[in-house]
Image: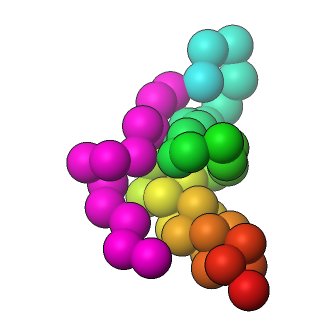
């Protein structure tokens, strides 16, 4: 599964520290936008198994 940042929605979480990434029906959080992206990629790899 090829995932790109352009297809993923990454945004700053209001009233919290950090960012969130949404792709499909999956949601991940991270302190930076890059960390949220990397966590999403890892989660999608686990889901594919």
In this orientation, does residue 48 appear? yes
The furthest residue to the left = 6
4 left or right of 13 in image? left
The residue drawn where x is 66% and y is 31% is: 17
Q: Residue 30 versus residue 21: which sits nearer the camera?
A: 21
The residue drawn where x is 32% and y is 54% is: 5
Residue 31, compared with residue 3, is above or below; it is above
Tell me where residue 21 sits by quadrant.
top right
Tell me where residue 16 sits by quadrant.
top right
* Quadrant of the snapshot with the C terminus: bottom right
In this orientation, does residue 29 appear? no
20 left or right of 10 in image? right
Q: Residue 14 versus residue 46: which sits nearer the camera?
A: 46
* Quadrant of the snapshot with the N terminus: bottom left
The furthest residue to the bottom = 49
Examine the residues drawn in magenta and state their main secondary structure: loop
Spot occupied by residue 23 in the image (x, y as percentages of width and height):
52, 46
How many numbered markers are drawn? Answer: 0
35 left or right of 16 in image? left
Residue 15, compared with residue 43, is above or below; it is above
Spot occupied by residue 18 in the image (x, y as percentages of width and height):
60, 37
Q: How is the image coloured?
A: rainbow
Residue 5, compared with residue 47, is above or below; it is above
The residue drawn where x is 32% and y is 47% is: 7
What segment is highlighted magenta in the picture?
1-12
């Amino acid at each position: 599964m090829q995932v790109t940042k352009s297809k993923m929605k990454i945004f700053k979480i209001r009233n919290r520290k950090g960012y969130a990434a949404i792709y499909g029906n999956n949601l991940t959080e991270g302190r930076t936008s890059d960390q949220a992206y990397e966590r999403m990629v890892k989660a999608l790899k686990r889901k594919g198994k």
